Structure formats: C-alpha cells, structure tokens
Image (cartoon, rainbow, N blue to C red):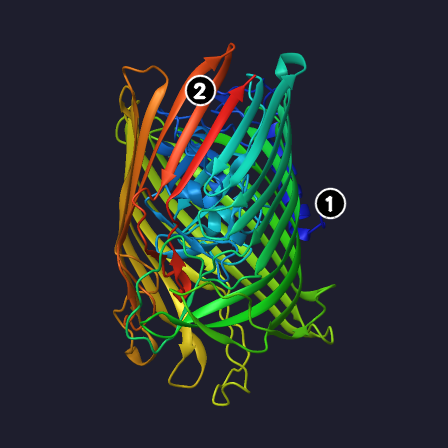
Amino acid sequence: MSLSAKCYGPLGLALLASASLLALSGGAVLAQEASTTKTKDDTIQLDPITVEGQAQQEAGDPTPPVYAGGQVATGGRTGVLGNQDVLDTPINTTAYTEQLINDQQADTLADVVDNDPGVLTSYSYGGSGDRYMIRGFILDGDDVALDGLYGTAPRQLIDMSMYERVEVTKGASAFINGISPGGSGIGGIINLVPKRATDAPVTRLTTTYGMDSEAGGHIDIGRRFGKDNQFGIRANLKYSDGETGIDDENRNSQVGALSFDYRGDNTRITVDAGHNEKNIDHGRTSINVNSALTSIPGAPDARHNYNADGTWADLQDDFLQGRVEHDFNEYVMGYVAAGTRHMEESGIYSTPTINGTDGSTTYSSSNIVREDTTNSAITGARVKFATGPVGHELNIGASAMRTKSHQAWAFGSASFNSNIYGDTPSSYPGIGAATGNLNDPGLRNTNDLTSYFLADTVSFLDDRVHVTGGVRRQSVTTRQFDLTSGARTTNYDADEYTPMVGIVGNVTDQVSVYANYMESLSPGETAASAASDATLTNPGEQLAPYTSKQYEVGAKADFGSFGGSVALFQIEKPSAYKNANNTFAADGEQRNRGLEFQLFGEPVQGTRILGGFTILNAELTDTQNGTNNGNTPIGVPDYVAKLGVEYDLPFMQGATLNARVIHTASQYVNVTNTQEIPSWTRLDVGARYKTNMYDYPVTLRANVENVTGNDYWASANGGYLTMGAPLTAKFSLTADF
C-alpha cells in the first residue's frame, strides 16, 4: 500500500488562506482550553479588524452524543461544516450508532442503512458489492466517505466491525462534500466514523454464527492513557468464514483496524488504519433482463443459487487516514486531513440474462482485475466572530483527490443457456482473449478532483436563526489510456461552481424548521463513437459535469426521549441523448419529488422505535422525441416504509425483543415502463439477553432476517434484478472483560 500523498496546488493555497485568517484573529485573544459545552462569553474587540468577537460555542469538531434509546445520535458530520446538531442544520441527517450495529449484528454497511426509510440497497453490477439508492438516485459503493474524506473508505463490501457510526445525509451535497470519486450520490451520501477509544476501557470478545455455517470471531480493545487520558488506542480484529443462507455461497472476511487519537487542550489528532478483505466463492449475482420480455418472471426460491459454479471474487482494501485540528484561540480552528487507500479486485464473474417468462436464461462470463490507489486531502479553517448582534462562522478551505486505476479484463468467448429455476450451472462459460495483462494490469485512467470552498453561517435573533451561504469551485480532470499501447485516449478537464443556501429557525427549544437550495455534480456522459453512430456531430465527446438542483423544506423535533423529522424535496438531474440536430447533449431530465418522514427514540421507557417512510414522485421529462415523458425512472419505487421496534421485557431483566418490517412498492425495470417487479415486504425478528457471568457482562443475541421466507425481487436498481435475501438466522455471544 502506498502511503505517500501527493501535494496539490489548491491545498497550498488553502493553507495560505487559513494562515491569513489566523493572523487576522490571532492577536486579538489568548488561547483558551477546549470546551465541549456550548457557552457564550462577553463580546470583545478584535484587532486589527473592527468586528465584535464571540467565543467559540464548541471547541474543535466533537462527535455528537447518542440520542435517547441509543440507536441514533443527536447530530452528524455536515460535510465541510463539520459535526452539527440535527436541530441546527438545514440538511436532513441521521447518524446510526455502534449500539445499533452490534444489536442488529450488522455485517456490512447495507445491513445498517436497511433501517433508513430513505435508502434502498441492491447489488452492484456483477453482484460482488453493495449499492444504494437515496431519494431515488444511485449511490455507488465507491462514493462512501470515511470521517468526512472521500476516496479512502473500502470500495464495495464494507465490513462494519471497525466503525462506530454510519451517517446518512439526504440531498444534493456537492458544496458540503464536493463531487464524489465515482460521481454518484446525487440524492445523498453516507459517511463512516471509525471506532475510537472511549473514556471507559474496552475489552470485548464476540463469537458469531450464521446460517448455514458462517462462523467467526471479533476482538475489540480500546484504552486511554496519559495525562487526563489524552491518548487513546482502539484495535479491532475480525475473522469469519462459511456458507451463507444462499445455497453453495461461501464468504470469507478478514478485517483489521487500528485507531490512535490525541485530545489536547487545543489540539486533536486522529490516525485510522484498516484492512477490509472479502472473498466470495460462488456468490449469487444480479440478473440482466432481455428488453424484449413482456413481463418479469417471479423470483425463484430465496435460497436458490442460480449463478454458475466456479465463479469467485476477491476484494481487498487497505487505508490510512489522519486528521489534525488546532484551536488557535477561542475563535479560530484550523484543520487538515489526508489519507490513502489501495484497492485490489479480481474475480471470475458469470452474468445471467433472463430471456423468457418461464425463467429461461443465457449466461455470459468475464475475468476482471483492477487495482486502484487513491490519495485524498482536505484543509481549512473555521472562524467565529460577530458584527454587532449578528454572529458568523466562516469556513474556508480546499480539497484534492487523485485516483489511479490499473485494469485488465477478458469477456466470455461463448455463452450457454439454462434456467433460473433449474439446477445451478456446473461451470461458467468459456472466457476469450484478454484486454491488458491480467497478471499485471496496466494504467487505465487517472482522475483528479480539486476544489476550493467558502461559506458563512450567520446567526441572529438570539442565535435562533441560522443562515448558511456558500460556494465551491470544483475541477475535474480525467485521463484515459489504451491498455495495449499505453497511449492516452481521453483528456477531459472541466470546472463548475456549486452554491448552497440554507436557513434553519428554532421555533422552540424542541422544534426547528429549515429550507435549502443545494446542487450536486456528476460526470457528464460520453457520446458514442463514430464507428457506433456515424450520424453524431460530436462522436466520443464527454459532456460537461451535470449540475443537479435540489429544493427542500422541512422540520425537525427533539422532545428529549424521542424525535423525528419531515422533509419535502425536489431534485432535478440532467440526462443526455442524441437530439434532433444529431448532437449528443444533456437535453433530458429526471425530476424526483418526495416526502420523507422519520421517527426515532424511546417514547416510553423500555420501548424504542426507529423508522418512517419516503413517498417518491419520480418522473422522466424532456426525453428523446418525448417518447418516455412522464414515465418513472428505473428502480425507483413510489414509496418505502420501514419500522423497527424494541421492547424490554418487564418480567425478565436484561431481555429485549425486537422486530422490523420493510415494505417497498413496485419498481420498473426499463424506461418504457413495460417491465415491472412487484412490491415486497420483509419481516425481521430478534432477541437479546444481557447478564453477568463470573462478574463479566455478557450479551447473547439472535436475529432472524426474512423470517417468513419470502421470495422476492428486492431491487431493479440499474436495470438489473437483485434477489432478496433468504431466511437467515444469526447468533452471537459478546463478553466484556
């Protein structure tokens, strides 16, 4: 793994800008000890600028505390604006906690976001990774953030053993987060928070077992030491192996993470490193659909593995990331974060295509090898001051990321026919000649993303109204290379500005209302080659980045023991096709309107709830020749509803029962809306028991997913089908020493 980070111009400029701001404010006040509580000091005069200063409300960027019931947190990271309380932000964010991850025995990130009514999960193409949909738009596994930094999180199957929180932010976010590495995330993003040492020592051993024979162990150790427990170390190791609830599908996981942190009076440092390895043997893949089909055949038995035998995928990610924050005084905090990730993927994949309503299927195959190295960094400063009765929090900084991707592949030289309801094919189809060297993949592309950002959050009316305005200048540079000759084939440079305006008002101490206008960026599509379409006026041209626009209003509530949120939104995303002038242009649009509602907390002592619903009105507009105007986009259901309940048994101390229901409306498989999968419902149940054995706390957990054994197509995301998981039982025993 490469641990070297490249130096970029924007970072140097941002550091100079930050230093200038620090110089302006540094002589005005003396450095003060960091505080984790909100306070207000007497107004003082800053010198040499003539504005009135106001003490920093929160030192540094502390992680928001856990909410009542322990399943969600009171806030989360709002991109470059840092960690914020939910009630104080004009953005809809939910942060799921380590307690929820443990109690639900969540294996991957998909298991966690299954709790969010605004998120749908599916497989990526080929079935070796998870994929998500937020507000009706795709979020690829490549575009998950790690502690606020893009490009360093594991890429496909993200194991949850090394993370203490999962933060889901809804809405367009190009300003607060920048463009994502893969360009997805138009409807929202997901951020992972690594486990760090807590004030209480942690020595935790967990053994696990899942259907049919997947067994494993997990060791979690954390300690703080030094003066006032300034230093902390947290280590996690996990191993599991065995057959899943899907016939003949075997998964092996090897995960390790090490975290260091320092909490000084004015300086905070974190360093996180991790290894995420997943080996999948005969994994059940996603399914393509023949466009000529008049209807989609029903899903086969949920346990049935229709994929060809002999297929496999090996996925490995190694990452290292560090962050430094320093309080120069009560008013100025500077920060810098940088990280690197090296990813390796190799596998033999077999992709089925359904051709008939009777389940008849054609199989093709491929051999894919890929190695990515990503270096990423961000730096900036936050400055708090006041101009008369108006408070300000100024955010300024820059970010940069470079990804180098080495690839090689070979596709099937032949195909064979089978049936998704029949016996598992005994082998995959033959594979033809390779493009590139499968043993030493060559450089396929480089992708550079750089940006500058500036924002000001203005507070007035006794700090009850906050208005945030900001802009980010994003630059995208892509180079693509021929794997045979090494010659550059694509040279793409583009710049865009993405603004953000948001307002939040605290109606009472428990209720706030908000509104925002934000934009997202995604890479423009590429026109077909002249060989493919000789009529095009711009063959092979990659269009400028697409700018998606979001309008949102909502309200949030925190009543102490329970809370929730409601939001109305509209997102408009451009799409491209060959227009009447034979030019490939972004003349089309997808418009998603929706209503989100979420509840969480412990409204009654011993009873916890977590759930809500999302109603979507997604529509294609300005399509080519108007053919599909008014149709629903692929894979976007009209509604999704989820509700989880936990109940502590009053007659048995330490015992808890839980249940969760997920219901998703039908989804179209094609843009013409002639192919559709039906709605589906899944019921999960579980129980846990906490007690002491030999004076050590012990927790026994049992969870059963899809307890009714429902057979269903879970998603049409991307235009291919993902099967729902079968009835799967999971057991664990955790002991704290």
Residue name at image x 66 percent, y 16 percent? 225
Please state the horizontal and vertical placement of residue 407, each as a whole percent of the image. 66, 64
Residue name at image x 44 percent, y 52 percent? 499
- Mark 2, mark 1: which one is toward the viewer? 1
**Residue underneath mark 1:** 3
Q: Is 269 placed above or below 210 here? A: above
Q: Furthest residue to the top?
A: 695
**Residue underneath mark 2:** 40
Using residue 423 as the reference point, say whether residue 367 is left or right of it.
Answer: right
Under mark 2, the amino acid is Lys
In this rendering, does residue 724 appear at all? yes
**46 and 627: which one is in front?**
627
The image quadrant where one finds the C terminus is top right
Please state the horizontal and vertical placement of residue 721, each as a whole percent of the image. 39, 62
Using residue 130 as the reference point, say whether residue 721 is left or right of it.
Answer: left
Residue name at image x 61 percent, y 63 percent? 477
Local SS, label 2: loop
When asked about the image quadrant of residue 607, the answer is top left
